[in-house]
Amino acid sequence: MKKYFLPLIFIFFVYSETGEVEFQDLIKIDSNHYEVNFVLENTALILSESSNDPFEILVTIKDSTIVNDFSSIQNYPIKSVEAYQDQNDVKIKISLYEAARWAKPQQIVENSNLRLFVPLFFGKDIKTMQREVIVAIDAGHGGRDPGAISSELNVIEKDITFLIASELARTLQNTEGYVPVLIRESDEFIYLDQRYQKSRRAGADIFISIHADAFALPSVSGASVYVWADNPSSISAKNLSKKVSPVRLEKYDLNEDTAMLKYPEMYAEKNRLSLSLAKKILHQLKLDPNTKLHKKSVEFADFRVLKSVDIPSIFLESGFISNPMDAKRLKGKPGRRMLARSLFLGINQYFAEVQDKNLFIFNKDSNLTYLIQSGDTLSEIAIRFGVPVMDIINLNMIRDEAIFPGQKIQIPHHQFYEIKPGDTLSEIALEYNSSLEEIQSLNNLVNTQIIVGQMIKLPSN
Ligand SMILES: [Zn+2]
């Protein structure tokens, strides 16, 4: 009998991680902005969705216990807030009189508590229940951990990753439907485990980790995209990495390893979506004339930052700082801007395919809406979104390139290919599963003459 004792304890340990949930309050920040607050014992795995008929938000806090079943009638525009136990989970139902822009529940460590809150925004122009996409951007390394260093070429990885992350955040920040969350906001040290924990607490829809490699051979160059390894062949590597750098979980953290065991379907779906996201980013990197690829397909590795059970996560190695060409590309703003562009366009393409009706970008006109910032120029915006400047000018009927901060402009959604030396139109057609005739008619070309730097519209499939 005794020999069964240990495994039983283990099973009990794996499946017994639950935390308490307690309703705190509903706060009116101003006439259009409310917050529903709960106190949590631990960081939780949380699912959330909205419905339009009736106007409702349903939040599921996995593996938790409600302190008191709770139901409260509220004043306009909030009809009621309910919280109740549903087997191992706590369900929160927020019913509304009118549609709201909401955000995924955020979990914030405050004093000695963990606060969970759901923000709600009301307004005359809000007709459907929708939320923005939250993109967690993880600039690799930082603080006392510089990452790779190339003293000869004067590049430090932590500086490069932060600049690429900031560039991506800048585009997301001003594009309607997206909210960036920088996991590292300055030159600070953050443990690997705290990076994915932070992204979970921020309610991230996806997690993007940005790095730059170095190698003993200066000839090795190019960018690559990784997703978390899920196959048995990588288990030994996984164990090795755990030995090298111990797991750093804090009091409030969610154990993702436990969650993987408990929710294999959720975990499999996350891996499938990570691969889909990685492929789209890799496709964009292939279209970027400035960036060479180190690997032509998505790579698999046990990079711990990618281990979240349900948040699709990718890892970009933006190049080798030990290679003179890559170092030059990563040190310059144009090179980093192209990497941020590939990430953004890949992300945008991914969400177009995900087709989540909760998202603000779902079913909108397929153009993107960008809010002009001071210092922006049309030509730079065109580069950041990978479209010809004339297409932006024509779509928005802009005269004399005159734009002003606060102006909203439409960005065409087409994919473009920038002509490189030696390219022919028929080769491009072949590469992108099109025909010469289709490419010609799409671009109003009367012959097959092209020039280097010209942007060719690609078919949308
Ligand atoms: Zn790195």
Image: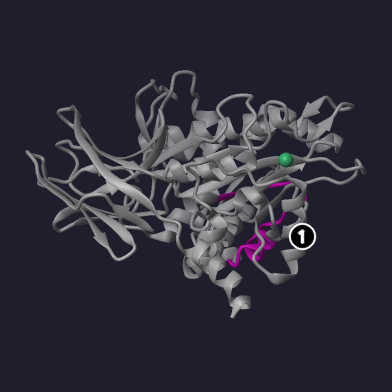
57 is within the stretch colored magenta:
no
Amino acid type of the residue tagged 1 in the rendering: Ala
Which region of the structure is painted magenta?
416-434
Residue 383 occupies which quadrant of the picture? top right
Residue displayed at 60% across by 59% down: 279
Q: In the current view of this chain or complex, which residue is farthest to the right?
A: 217
Q: In this view, does 125 lie above or below 461?
A: above
Quadrant for residue 33, please give it.
Answer: top left
Residue displayed at 63% across by 38% down:
191
Residue 459 position, x and y percent, is: 51, 60
Residue drawn at point x = 66 percent, y = 57 percent: 425
Relative horizontal placement of residue 16, taking residue 359 as reference (left or right): right
Q: Position of residue 97 (x, y in %)?
A: 9, 46
Q: On the picture, is 170 further left or further right than 175?
A: right
- Element marked by disc 1: helix
Q: Which of 189 and 71 is in front in this view?
A: 71
How far across and how far down the image is residue 330, in percent? 73, 33
Measured as percent of width and height from the top left, residue 271 is found at: 56, 63
Answer few, some or many: residues within 10 Å of disc 1's Cα (few below 14, many 20 plus, some between 14 and 19): some
Residue of label 1? 237
Asked whether the viewer can see residue 284, the reply is no
Q: Quadrant of the N terminus?
A: bottom right
Foreground of the two, 224 or 397:
224
Quadrant observed for ligand 1 in the rendered image: top right
Vertical placement of residue 447 versus 337, above or below: below
Whether residue 370 is visible: yes
123 lies above or below 277:
above
Q: Is residue 426 magenta?
A: yes
